[in-house]
Amino acid sequence: MADDAAGPPVRKVLYHHRTQGKAVEGVHIRGITDALRAEGVQVDIISLPGADPYSSPKAMSPTRQARPWMRLVTRLPEPLFELTEIAYNLIAGWRILAWLRRNRDVDFIYERYSLFMYAPIWIARRRGIPIILEVNDSATVHRVRPLFFRRIAMAIERCAFRRASGLVFVSAIFRDRAQAAHESMAPAIVTPNAANIDKFTFTPAQRDAARTQFNLHGHVVCGYLGAFVPWHAIDQFVHRIADHLAAAPHLKLLLVGDGATFPALKEFVAQRGLAQQILMTGRVEHDAVPGLLAAMDMAILPSAGDYTSPVKLFEFMACAVPPVAPDFDPIKEILVEGENGWMFKAGDLDAAVACVLERSRDPTQLGRVGANARAYITAHRQWRNNILELIAFHDALRRGDVVG
């Protein structure tokens, strides 16, 4: 892990989060935790009660709640919901203090930042324990459910970002926006998401079986993996490509996941008589995802957050499935046009359709670009890479080699 000049190696980390530990959140938490443990670090996790990421449902739907009581909380009017989030500081603080009474040799606390959460930083500073915030959310970003107490959220976030030992952002543009909003912040690094290559490695027989399952032999398969929600725009993409599929009988779409727009899209596909060319699996466990990816030749990401680092992008690439993705800055940090994927102007779904249709006609190029994508993930973007960067960052903070 760390060299001798960096000081003693990291041996124990407390990972605290307030998410439900499901879907992509769970993938990320398990990726970080498993990679730390593989490096010999003891990791203890404090989760939202009843939301252990190793036991919470791993189904892909973002609308499914991990526990019944969580459904009640999420349905509260926005002011009450946010007051509940603020009050959770008391629970988080009590649980972290209880853990610290039993564990006095922790090297640092790793916190998946949540809005209104400050207790872990207050405790860490009082105890002289380094705390690093992993920032996936912010009061500065546009929200489907707008903040009611936005000024309070901003004030707490400003204190959190200044008083943490260090910050980890998933993209450079996200870091820069936070810096512009809060002016003064703790030292920060940028670490995009990742995927473990060993979970996305298939034999020819496994790929053949996956294609046989869905009757995909003799076709080029463009896949989608994720939530069927308006902001991911898979429904809009399908509506646009539907008129072109009759002229592209070699192409099939394999759409994996569910969500709010799934029922209407499934009905649209049936009404247009496209069910043989557009296959919709519905919700699947994350552990079943690699087998579905094995059936794909290319992948489409119709839209994404303009500051996010989509986990599905890395999973496609790890599987040697070249992605077609919007040209948001975080994606441009990963993709090299025509080398390990392709990009279209964000928001221009007609361009996305044109790109998919064009690339689907050249299986040789798909194979070459897919191989490059997998090689990139193998060398640079496995969860172990994230952990090595995190530990190096911790060591630099400890030595005082980085400044805000």
Image: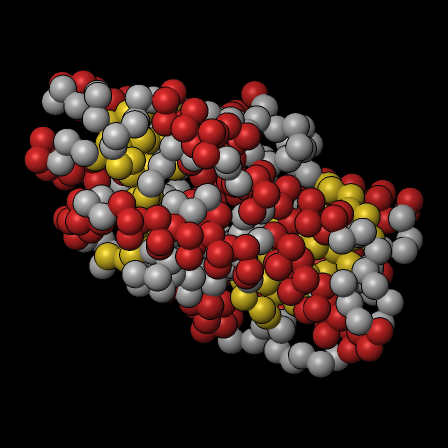
Q: Quadrant of the N terminus?
A: bottom right
Q: Is residue 297 left or right of residue 6?
A: left
Residue appearing at x 68%, y 62% in the figure: 388
Left or right: 94 with respect to 18?
right
Q: Position of residue 44 (x, y in %)?
A: 78, 44
Give above or below for 106 relative to 315: below
Q: Quadrant of residue 133?
A: bottom right
Q: Is residue 333 above or below residue 147?
A: below
Residue 83: x percent and y percent?
Answer: 56, 42
Which residue is found at the position 56% from the left and 21% from the top? 68
In front of the other: 161 or 318: 318
Q: How is the image coloured?
A: secondary structure
What is the x, y in percent for residue 29?
62, 44
**Is residue 53 visible to us here?**
yes
Q: Residue at 91% x, 44% y: name it.
A: 102
User: Relative to 94, is 110 on the left or the right?
Assistant: left
Q: Residue placed at 58% from the left, 53% from the top? A: 382
- Is residue 232 visible to the viewer in this orientation of the structure? no
